[in-house]
Image: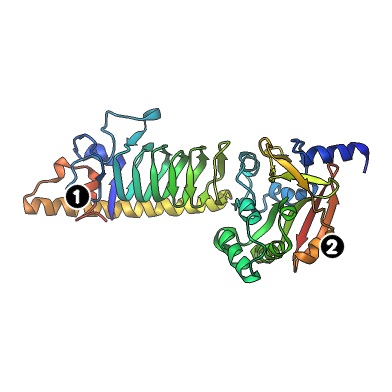
């Protein structure tokens, strides 16, 4: 990693609003541009820019707004209790049959038992051939605390939402193989280290 | 279930009356009109349902509408704009050409053209419109169907359903008027079309 990339990674981890392209989203965007219907699920909060970007495409967008609720789940509870919690947070009726699930930053902020339960639930929500698009910190040693959400903006770039008023904490810097192992059943299709030090993943069943 | 036909309110011969706190249109003895008097129009000349009005049933019409009151049931304005104002509270399935949400909605919203969610809005339900705009700071959780074909299909069904209900309502209105004449009550003249169309006792 170059010095410039390292500076950008630290700057982003500290909460600077530096937009960047998500290259692994391109195939989905191209399918939308070609008029193909896509079902998307965003685990984050509804963002005006995301809706502006997707308006006019043939798509169904589920907005789960569950990032904080998932971060607050007690990792000490049983796997069955966690599964029930995820069923309540991510009901099939609203969020099932997804061609692409946006799971940005969340994987860095949850303990392994919650991560494993999340993996089980996301597997159940994917359509045949569906994928999970994830972003995690990789190069930076710290990350915003609390989470400083990323979102897909109206120009197709990924940005930080609003102003960050919090601090920072150590980033777990998951190894790709470890993430794949914890997200039982999901396989890494592609993983790309971005210029800003984040790791971009596409997982599939 | 009561039917409220705003497009025909001018034909009903109803007289505008003052809004009474807590008036419920399910009550056939109510003397308040469900919408603002013909001379009173809201933003952009739209009809207004005031904050003290509660309606239970199906509300449909052929003009733009602003809801500041409470509605439970269904709202059908497939060719017009609907604004759910900051004081508006809907527990309803809503069909309109354009929907602006500033108040509280529990139910699914269908917009033939678009749905705009203001930051004061609280929505528990799903949205269906080819274009959906969200104001900065607004919260929404659910599913948004933006596939124009799916929206068109849903709106067509709503229009067919609306047309079917209009025919039913017209029949019910005629039957109700005939009943009134037979009974010598002659009550239709002093009430809104909505009440006459509601048959015997609302929902």
The chain identifier of the residue carrying mark 2 reads A
For the point 39% across and 38% down, the residue is B87
Compared with A60, B12 (above or below) is: above
Compared with A68, B120 (above or below) is: above
**Considering the image in quadrants, where does the N terminus of chain A appear?**
top right
Q: Is residue A38 visible?
A: no
Q: Is residue B173 visible?
A: yes
Neighbourhood count class around disc 2 (C-alpha, 10 Å): few under 14, some 14–19, many 20 upward: few
Q: Would you say B51 lies left or right of A162 here?
A: left
Q: Would you say A58 lies left or right of A107 here?
A: left
Badge 2 element: helix
- Judge by depth and name the residue closer to the eye, A185 or B181: A185
**Position of residue A57 measured from the top left corner of the image (x, y, whole percent):** 64, 46
**Position of residue A189 measured from the top left corner of the image (x, y, whole percent):** 81, 60
For the point 77% across and 48% down, the residue is A26
Q: Which mark is residue B67?
A: none
The chain identifier of the residue carrying mark 1 reads B
Q: Would you say A151 lies left or right of B18 here?
A: right
Neighbourhood count class around disc 1 (C-alpha, 10 Å): few under 14, some 14–19, many 20 upward: some
**Considering the image in quadrants, where does the C terminus of chain A appear?**
bottom right
**Position of residue B11 measured from the top left corner of the image (x, y, whole percent):** 22, 39
For the point 50% across and 53% down, the residue is B153
Q: Would you say A172 lies left or right of A145 here?
A: right
Q: Which residue position holds label 2?
A: A177
Badge 1 element: loop
Q: Which residue position holds label 1?
A: B28
Number of the front mark, 2 or 1? 2
């Amino acid at each position: 990693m170059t010095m410039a990339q390292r500076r950008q990674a630290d700057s982003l981890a500290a909460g600077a609003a530096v937009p960047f392209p998500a290259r692994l989203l391109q195939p989905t965007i191209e399918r939308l541009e070609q008029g193909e219907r896509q079902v998307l699920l965003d685990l984050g909060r509804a963002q005006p820019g995301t809706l502006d970007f997707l308006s006019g495409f043939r798509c169904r967008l589920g907005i789960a707004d569950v990032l904080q609720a998932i971060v607050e789940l007690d990792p000490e509870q049983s796997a069955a209790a966690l599964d029930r919690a995820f069923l309540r947070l991510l009901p099939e009726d609203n969020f099932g049959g997804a061609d692409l699930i946006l799971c940005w930053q969340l994987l860095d902020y949850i303990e392994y038992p919650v991560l494993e339960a999340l993996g089980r639930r996301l597997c159940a929500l994917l359509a045949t051939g569906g994928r999970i698009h994830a972003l995690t910190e990789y190069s930076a040693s710290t990350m915003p605390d609390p989470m400083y959400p990323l979102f897909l903006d109206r120009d197709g770039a990924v940005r930080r939402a609003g102003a960050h008023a919090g601090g920072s904490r150590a980033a777990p810097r998951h190894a790709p193989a470890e993430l794949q192992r914890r997200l039982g059943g999901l396989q890494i299709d592609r993983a790309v280290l971005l210029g800003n030090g984040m790791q971009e993943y596409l997982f599939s069943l | 279930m009561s039917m409220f036909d705003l497009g025909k309110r001018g034909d009903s011969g109803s007289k505008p009356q003052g809004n009474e706190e807590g008036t419920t249109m399910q009550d056939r003895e109510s003397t308040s009109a469900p919408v603002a008097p013909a001379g009173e129009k809201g933003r952009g000349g739209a009809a207004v349902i005031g904050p003290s009005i509660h309606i239970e049933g199906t509300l449909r019409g052929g003009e733009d509408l602003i809801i500041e009151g409470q509605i439970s049931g269904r709202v059908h304005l497939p060719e017009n704009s609907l604004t759910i104002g900051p004081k508006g509270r809907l527990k309803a399935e809503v069909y309109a050409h354009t929907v602006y949400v500033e108040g509280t909605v529990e139910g699914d919203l269908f917009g033939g053209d678009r749905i705009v969610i203001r930051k004061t809005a609280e929505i528990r339900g799903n949205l269906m419109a080819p274009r959906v705009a969200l104001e900065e700071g607004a919260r929404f959780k659910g599913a948004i169907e933006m596939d124009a074909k799916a929206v068109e299909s849903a709106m067509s069904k709503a229009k067919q359903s609306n047309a079917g209900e209009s025919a039913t309502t017209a029949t019910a209105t005629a039957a109700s008027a005939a009943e009134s004449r037979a009974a010598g009550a002659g009550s239709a003249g002093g009430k809104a079309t909505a009440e006459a169309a509601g048959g015997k006792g609302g929902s």
